[in-house]
Amino acid sequence: MKNVIYALLVLCAFSLPAFGQQDFEFNGGYQHASGDQGLDGFTAGAGWNPLPQFQLYLTYDGLYDHSTLGSFALTQVGLTVVNSHMQEILTGPRLFLPGLWKGHGRVEGHRLIPYLDAGFGEARLHTELRQPLIGTVQAADTAFAWALGGGMDYRIYPHWTIRGDLGLLRTHFVESGQSRVRLGLGVVWSVRSRAQ
């Protein structure tokens, strides 16, 4: 994973002389993933467009869940609390598809641009179980993760965009695979104006 990030940084550094022809973006927002009683949190990332409709991106998600299993509260087992924290870092390509909406992609002067993306990287899940009889039990695992999905950019100002995305996140904790639905809503700021 580190080698992929280093390769992206080297590509970015060599592209700086042609900076005026390319675009960089920074984004952040809300992220949800199913599984482990549903995890909610934030996403932050960056993207580099060497071509107008093609982007290489890097994203980090920090997702949390704090659940109480109240069905055991009145038994000898007692109140059980589960805390989960999942982190993931993914990098990969994103392909924008403005041609699909030609002539229909404008809403009151704003622009809708659909996209498809794929990401590969690493995920870490840390879970803590607190229960009066057994005390606190913790477990954690770090494993390969990949995601496939897509979404829609809605340009609100030349440098500002609202991004909604939906996809499949596949994690591989404890040597077995888990499929999760991934849903996000965020804000994107781009260095170059996207006012076409």
Image (spheres, rainbow, N blue to C red):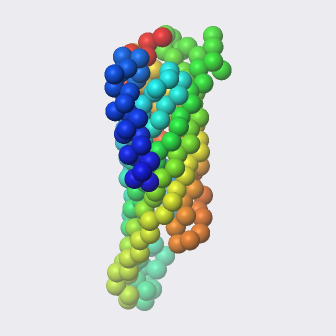
Q: Is residue 39 visible?
A: no
In this rendering, position of residue 191 left or right of residue 96: left
Q: Nearer the viewer, residue 151 or 40?
A: 151
> In which quadrant of the rendered view does residue 10 lie?
top left
Q: Residue at x 40, y 56 (%)?
A: 87
Q: Quadrant of the N terminus?
A: bottom left
Q: Residue at x 40, y 46 (%)?
A: 5
Q: Position of residue 52 (x, y in %)?
A: 50, 21
188 w.r.t. 169: above or below: above
Q: Residue at x 44, y 65 (%)?
A: 142
Q: What is the residue that sits farthest to the right in this orientation? A: 100
> In which quadrant of the rendered view does residue 29 lie?
top left
Q: Position of residue 12 (x, y in %)?
A: 38, 33
> In which quadrant of the rendered view does residue 115 lie?
top right
158 w.r.t. 34: above or below: above
In this rendering, position of residue 104 left or right of residue 58: right
In this rendering, position of residue 84 left or right of residue 102: left
40 w.r.t. 55: above or below: below
Q: Position of residue 166 (x, y in %)?
A: 56, 41
Q: Is residue 64 visible?
A: yes
